[in-house]
Image (spheres, helix red, strand yellow):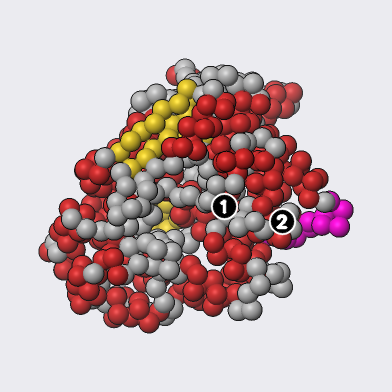
Amino acid sequence: MCGICGEVNRDGAVRMRVLEDMADPLTPRGPDGAGVFAQNGIGLAHRRLSILDLKATSQQPMVDPDLGLAIAFNGCIYNFRDLRQELTAKGYRFFSQGDTEVILKAYHAWGADAVKRLQGMFAFAIWEMWTGRVVLARDRLGIKPLYLAQVGASLRFASTLPALLAGGGVDTAIDPVGLHHYMSFHSVVPAPHTLFRGVRKLPPATVLTLEPDGRRHEHVYWSVRMGEGFDAAEMGEEEWRETLTQALQTAVERRAVSDVPIGVLLSGGVDSSLLVALLARLGHSDIRTFSVGFESVNGLKGDEFEYSDLIARTYGTDHQRIVIPQERVLEALPGVIGAMSEPMMSHDCVGFYLLAQEVAQHVKVVQSGQGADETFAGYHWHEKMLTSADPVADYAALYFDRDHDEMAKALSPDLLGADHSRAFVEAFFERCGETSPINKTLQIDTEIMLVDDPVKRVDNMTMAFGLETRVPFLDHEMVELAARIPSELKVQSGGKHILKEAARRILPAEVVDRPKGYFPVPALKYIRGPYLDFARDVLNQEAARTRGIFRRDYVDRLLADPEGNLTAKGHSKLWQVTVLEHWLQTHAA
């Protein structure tokens, strides 16, 4: 896993200084090496985190003059050894031992359809030297990011939005659609939008081809539809449970490929505990596990150590508790917000950031349990959506942070526009067709919310310290299986019923039957004391007043009563606007 950036300039030469300026902010994502390549109006830059093939032969950008191809790649291809064997049988010869060269050869052998053969997480750019064609691609679940910006005649791309900004010339005018989504859709801004008019992001499972004559075309190479093709009449719960267990074990085993040690981010919940149990079942005897906890505030508990300790004892892991005092949370906030590719309001960001800071001192790769709640119906709104008579209205009431009426009170009139978030959900649910409300909800959670909330959050916060995070629940075959399982088997028992039943045969009952937990950061739910001072300082800056995104009376109301202004999900509205404004002050002045 690394950081990439590049430029396609059809009207002239690539400026090396721009490539270097974009690559510099990517250094934390790839602290082990750097490379730049430019030729004929095409420029690629790379920051390397060495996980597979630690030798210099896997340095990037990688150029294969015999095939006439160059690549900059971020991610990990878990089946690269199988693909290498297949390609060797076709006559290809390899000069390295890693997965990057396998992508190059696979592209030469199968063209853009090679992405369908890749099992893993990836974002890459490939240049065909002899034709001038450039191909950009992103993995099926959007685990690896790729941002795009048109700057004059050049198309630039990068693993993070701040890296694009560092190259200069990007239109940073606020996009009203992206802003509406941020403020309403719990900070989720669905692709291709971002907060800026001049920046877009390549959607997941998409290949974008840039032709030498300036034409562009993109196609979606993978999709999954919740509830389609399930074998409800042919498979009972027991068979689903066995199938699920085997699929997850395969996903965990795939993500154990590495030339460096691997750990597990262990929250003590069912999802991360299953990863530990299955690694142990696969014969891994030296598992390292890490858990984080925070000081309690106002009776809100800040750790779940009792459960993570139980799992560590059960499977004999080398376990480390990381306890974060309140003052360290406060000190970390500028770094946390600075590490965001796009502003995110979730308190979990601080938890993952501080956890990653410690874990990266011990291992370079970890497995994590993201994705299970979205694909196996683990959230509180899933049960309520099971029998919804008005899916759009009910989903908005359960998930949105603000309705459009409140948005009118919050935003400057020139940035308000239409009810973009409600319209997005309406269009999305319409596209889902006649399927049930719960399947529509699971579809939008998997295809949209998952990508631009938990997945982006974990990528941003762990890669801030060069820590590669692998997510077995987002193995695309796991997601396809989850889509086929009848929704009733997922929503029962407070959510994730079938996953809990699979876990029951493996994990201690105390973990399976525990109340659902989150990554609690109490100090950011109850914004008071120095945290309130932090928010007030950010929102009273001259930059904030001049930018004028928010109506001042709305900001003053949040500052006067932060605990009385929580979202439907119980998060601080004050924290949400503070993060946005601080992020803009950090990255866009």
Residue 489 badge: 2
Q: Is residue 182 magenta?
A: no
Q: Mark 2 is on which residue type?
A: Leu
Figure check: 441 above or below 422: above
Q: Quadrant of the C terminus?
A: bottom left
Residue 151 seen in the current view: no
Does residue 563 appear to the left or right of 38 in the view shown?
A: left
Q: Residue 577: x and y, percent?
A: 29, 64
Residue shown at 66% from the left, 72% from the top: 387
Mark 1 touching mark 2, by CB under 8 A? no
Residue shown at 43% from the left, 25% from the top: 363
Residue 313 badge: none
Does residue 451 appear to the left or right of 94 in the view shown?
A: left
Residue shown at 65% from the left, 41% from the top: 503
Q: Quadrant of residue 311?
A: top right
Q: Mark 1 is on which residue type?
A: Asp
Main SS of the magenta part reads: loop
Q: Residues within 10 Å of mark 1 (few under 14, many from 20)?
A: many
Q: CA distance from mark 1 to mark 2?
A: 14 Å
Furthest-right residue in this view:
234
Q: Residues within 10 Å of mark 2 (few under 14, many from 20)?
A: many
Q: Residue 372: x and y, percent?
A: 58, 48
Q: Residue 444: x and y, percent?
A: 57, 63
Instruction: Give the residue pinned by disc 1.
Output: 373
Figure check: 488 above or below 373: below
Q: Which residues are magenta?
A: 222-235
Helix, strand or loop status at disc 2: helix
Q: Earlier in the sequence, mark 1 or mark 2?
A: 1
Q: Is residue 223 magenta?
A: yes
Query: In front: 69, or 271?
Result: 271
